[in-house]
Image (cartoon, rainbow, N blue to C red):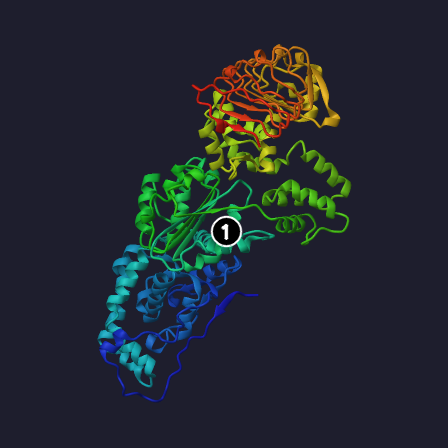
Amino acid sequence: MDKIIMKDTKLSSSSSSTSEFPTAEGVLRRRNETEPISVMTVHDVFLSFRGEDTRASFTSHLCTALLNAGIKVFIDDNDLQIGDQISPSLSLAIAQSQISIIVFSINYPDSRWCLDELEKIMNCRIDRGQVVVPVFYHIDPSEVRHQRGQFGIAFQRLLNKITDGKDILFLRGANREMIWSFLRGANREMIWRETLRMAANIAGFVILNSRNESEDIKRIVDNVSHLLNKTDLFVAHNPVGIESRVQEVIQLLPIQSNGVLLLGMWGMGGIGKTTLAKAIYNKIGRNFKGRSFLANIRENGEKIDGLLGLLKQLLFDICKEPTITIPNIESGMNTLQSKLSYKKVLIVLDDVNTLDQLHTFCGSPKWFGPGSIIIITTRDMHLLQRRVHKIYNMTIMNESESMELFSWNAFKQATPTRDFDRISINVVKYSEGLPLALEVLGSYLYNKTESEWELVLEKLQRIPHNQVQNKLRISYDGLNDDDEQEIFLDIACFFIGMDRNDVILVLNDCGLSAEIGIRVLVERSLVTVDDKNILGMHGLMRDMGREIIREESPRRPEERSRLWFHEDVVDVLSRQNGKEGVLGLALKLSRANAKCFSTKAFEKMERLRLLQLDEVKLDGDFEYVSRDLRWLSWNGLSQIPINFYRKNLVSIELKNSNLELLGNKTLWMVKLKILNLSHSHFLTQSPDFSNMPNLEKLVLKDCPLLYAIEKLEEDSEQTESSITLR
């Protein structure tokens, strides 16, 4: 089906004459009242040209090329009519077009018809933000700008026709609108000159002595196609839960404001920040004079001249000037400020991860015109704090949304197919409401058998899906120093569910800046801290961290820095082949599956600093355990091992023990700050605290036989409030 619209715009002549001539003042005030205030976009392109110059050649070829590119074109294909007035329908067609292409040729200004079209086009550019693409065909832009040369001669011919009265011959039998047009002409020279100047100042395409006009036309069509593609963005194949979140964000936006709003959207990787930003962009974008969506700033910014290229894209998207020259970042920032400071714009800065990136595109709200909105998506809360006006905290999908999104990808319908209900629930639980995982795993499991699903789920317990892993790892790789990465890995393997302050005490003594590090991890959406000060982490983020450890030595677990997977730990302890590089080890068993190992299994783990054991018995001298040990969590301990003394221990957790008392000599620990003996039902007496001069926290919950608590040192910083009995 052709997308070209050929409009008959001939003016019908009238036999009746009129004697009611308007005054000059009325001519200047008159406005076209036939066009509605708000119009719907109908055409992709309106093509304005001088028929006698280019109809049978350049314009015809350009129109065909636009059609072949799937672009809907409105073209008026008639000669100039009596009175040279564009009809209301033609005026409306201009307003209903997204883009106007003006083909300036030598005789273009010889036509009042063309100049009235041009005036209407420029008004739409000012009032509606319509994109204007000038083409200077065998004419220099300066001749159009200043009405000089052959172009100026043609323009003067039109002015002469108006001033010497030759056009009066056309008024015989003319209707009222033609007379309006004629009398208005004498006052329009200034307007025409200004519109020509404005149009010539827009960067466009200059075709002078071209040897290959087909290449010129291709460049124009490619440019127009690019401009049209920048209108609405593809959001998602299955936009589950998006509309409700769009409405939540819109509630944060001012209904009417002359200020500039900076809105941050914060959340972990794969949670849907970009998808939501696209939906908002499409929803409200038409309310702005210009808009731009800069995608993947983090990734693109790492390329050579990546930020410079994004600056050019931003200016092109909003100003629609393809030939803006930006030699460097500083020049681009200045151009951005000067070009946009009076425009109401919508800009989305997607996946920002450094302050330099933010300052490049949004150095100040003053860069943008009244009513502008700048949306910034990031994984790093620190970039937003004290820099944006409002922050939208992304949330994971609820159970219903998760199942629907997963089902669309796994079954191509809104619910699971029969016999897959149970296993679908397991996959959804594993994904923990993360849209990325739901989509990736759903697509991966599509058309597989139930037994294949079971195998995939079993594998996921040990090795995360590579596509999900890579997306989440971006945040980890973006951490600034080794301390932050080490802290993240320790939390992922050992400290989820623990009190933040306790973890800080332990890791600080390991030589890590834990307080600052944990704050950074929270800001980067890698770790959470709830209202009870408990550390948390999304399950897939935890798996990502543990996979980083597994990749240190996929086939030889004893070579890894941390051990937590029970099969690997049992293997290493049984073989007694642990290496010096092991920094942390956790083995959590049930009472029914309790195991016993020799303390010699720890002999080579000289740098071990974190040890967590549940229902594990160690046979032998504790002397084999590293003296660098800072944290010992040992649930179900039956008796204190020989040489249990470790001067560097900061935290001891002996919950659910069968101990009756702790010998004074074995517990001389200068660095110890945390002692937790909760649920030790046989404990009758607390240790001698004089051997623990730096103890800050004592937890004795659910110790029913405990009848005596040794007095705390009066000259120490310990207080009764540090003791927790319930």
Q: Residue at 47% of width from left, 27% of height from top?
A: 514
Q: Residue at 42% of width from left, 38% of height from top?
A: 382
Q: Residue at 47% of width from left, 65% of height from top?
A: 43
How far across and down, in percent of the image, does residue 704 sit?
63, 28
Residue type at tag 1: Lys
Task: Quarter of the image for the N terminus: give it.
Answer: bottom right
Compare residues 260 and 593 and report the one nearer the observer.
593
Residue under pointer 1:
278
In the image: residue 134, left or right of residue 692: left
Q: Is residue 725 above or below residue 17?
A: above
Q: From this viewpoint, which residue is outermost toward the bottom?
A: 16
Q: How many marks?
A: 1
How far across and down, in percent of the image, does residue 79 sit?
39, 72
In the image: residue 114, left or right of residue 466: left
How far across and down, in percent of the image, does residue 572 sit?
68, 18
Please identify the quarter of the rendering in which residue 49 is found. bottom left
Q: From this viewpoint, which residue is outermost toward the front?
A: 707
In the image: residue 324, left or right of residue 240: left
Residue 294 showing in the rendered view: yes
Q: Secondary structure at mark 1?
A: helix
In the image: residue 410, left or right of residue 718: right
Q: Is residue 270 above or below residue 342?
A: above
How far across and down, in percent of the image, does residue 348 sit?
44, 48
Task: Quarter of the image for the C terminus: give it.
Answer: top right
